[in-house]
Image (cartoon, rainbow, N blue to C red):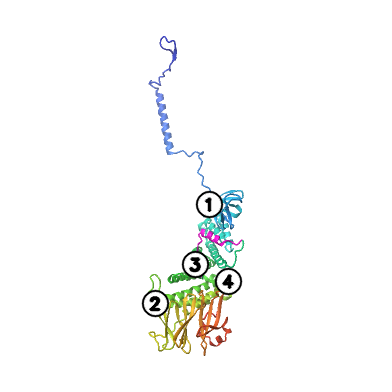
Amino acid sequence: MRVRTTRGSGQIGYRPTRRRHEFGFPQHEGLSMRTLMIWTLAVLAAIACVVYPPAARAATPAATAPPATRYALVMEDALPLRSGARSGGTPLALLTQGELLELRGERLDYVQVWDLSRERGGFVRARGVRALALTPDEAPELLGLVRFLRDRPGSESLGLGIAAAYLKAAPAGAITAEAFDAMGTMADRLAWRANVAAVNAANVPVRPGEPNIAAQLEVANGLGVHFTSLERDGHLRLCYDGDAFRHVAALSPTPEQSARAALALTRHDCIADTTPPLQRWQADQARAQILARVPAADLPPWLRNRIRLRQAGVWSAIAFEDSRRLAVEAGATPPGVPAVSAGDIAAAGNAALEALGGVDKNELADDDQSTYTDAAMRVGASRWAAEPVPAPAPTGLRVATRPGQPGETCVLLLDGKHDAGHPLARHCTFAAVWTASARANAASTALVLAVQPLAAWRELWMFRATPAGWTLQVLPPATESGDPGYVEFAGWVAGTDGVLAAREVRDAQHPGRFLRTYELLDGNTLATIKAADAPGSLKAFWRFQDPAWKRATVSLR
């Protein structure tokens, strides 16, 4: 509204018109009802928002799962890991077949990877690796590769890597004994190849392109496959610890799988020579139980022969160890260990002979011929355990045993005039003394005795009368102590001082060969006069061999 200002100013001003509803004038009744309705609707809308919250806007991006990790399995030996995707990239490391890498990307004909063991990234050629997602869909293909590589020498680390990938990819319920059987077979063969390479390293140069065994062992160790080192015969021997084969026994294996696992877990050459006697006895008892669980009747004949040969060697060792325990403990059995008796010794000796006798020689594979000889020598070393001890004769030349220092057995030479209080000769030993083997000559001037210092090593003792008194001579199977081996009495040569003996031992010059000879010995020095590879080739054996020896010896197998 236009108004005039202060008098005399001559100016015209403006001011707002005051409306009645803005400055305290009473409002209309309809306006009050409208306000109430607005407040009511607002309250209802707020309650509805609390009770029924609005859905997330469609425009809000949904949370996405991180991409699955992909892997790359090295398929070649000496594959360079480079700093760049070029052949001129700096080599950072040499990779070995079977190593598992993380796949990070691709560039040109290279793939970018991350080495988990070395904690280092780099690039490798795409053709040298195999991309894996380790999903259940890949499991059947990986198992097929494991089957192929199981019997392929030289690719053990690659086979172990693929087997490990299969175990990671396959569902838990789908894993059977087959994968573990293959892993154990490849690990056992890798250890064997390492041992052969170590023995031949001085004589056979490494051929170009030959797989690097040391690198493959390192890859296997990174996959959780472990080996133990043993010193034997001046060489370091590698043995697989058998973890995969122990899994085989727990997964309902086939008879063949069970047999392979048992043979791998009961090797003679993978027990340290420094194992204490009681622990060695426990280990051999465990080996016998593993072999007993194998369904031998369901095996092919050649594989059944291998089980019986291993049983023969294990039970012969148990017979020796039972004899030593009986002599050492003398009734004071250590707590937690079952006691042994003379009956246990005889039972173990008979079990060894029965296992060896159950071998079908017509079904022996070519690779098992030396194994058969080895088992026969082990049984031959302990065969006197199965022989009953005769009652002591009141007269004549004979032996008796008495305990000596802790662990010792003292041999007393007696006759009708000399009892245990005044023996003709006395000698103590820590070996097992088989008194059933004592044989005196007709003139009672000499006596031979079988004494076994080791589980697979038996010596021949001879007591002989001389003008200076009784002397003792010891004839070992060989000049170098290398298991197994034995030498045994085969008869007296009448009218002379000659002694017949049978000897069987491993060839020191060629460890894979064995020597079996039948000899005529000088009774005074035990020196060999004549020797032949068959008893029929010596005239003395035709005439003077002991019938008891011919009946019980295993050298005439």
Q: CA distance from mark 3 to mark 2?
A: 31 Å
What range is drawn magenta here?
209-232
The mark found on residue 441 in the picture is: none
SS category of the residue bearing label 2: loop
Q: Residue furthest front?
A: 468
The mark found on residue 120 in the picture is: 1
Crowd rating for badge 4 (residues with CA inside 10 Å; few <14, some 14–19, many 20+) = few
SS category of the residue bearing label 4: helix
The residue to which callout 3 is attached is 230
Q: Is residue 158 visible?
A: yes
Q: Is residue 353 visible?
A: no
Residue type at the position of mark 3: Leu
Left or right of 435, for residue 357: right
**Residue 400 location in percent, x, y?**
42, 83
Indicate whether 167 appears above or below 60: below
User: In the image shown, does 459 or 8 lie closer to the viewer?
Assistant: 459
**Residue 525 location in percent, x, y?**
50, 84
Residue type at the position of mark 2: Gln
Crowd rating for badge 2 (residues with CA inside 10 Å; few <14, some 14–19, many 20+) = few
SS category of the residue bearing label 3: strand
Q: CA distance from mark 3 to mark 4?
A: 24 Å
The residue to which callout 2 is attached is 405
Residue type at the position of mark 1: Arg
**Residue 434 is drawn in which quadrant?**
bottom left
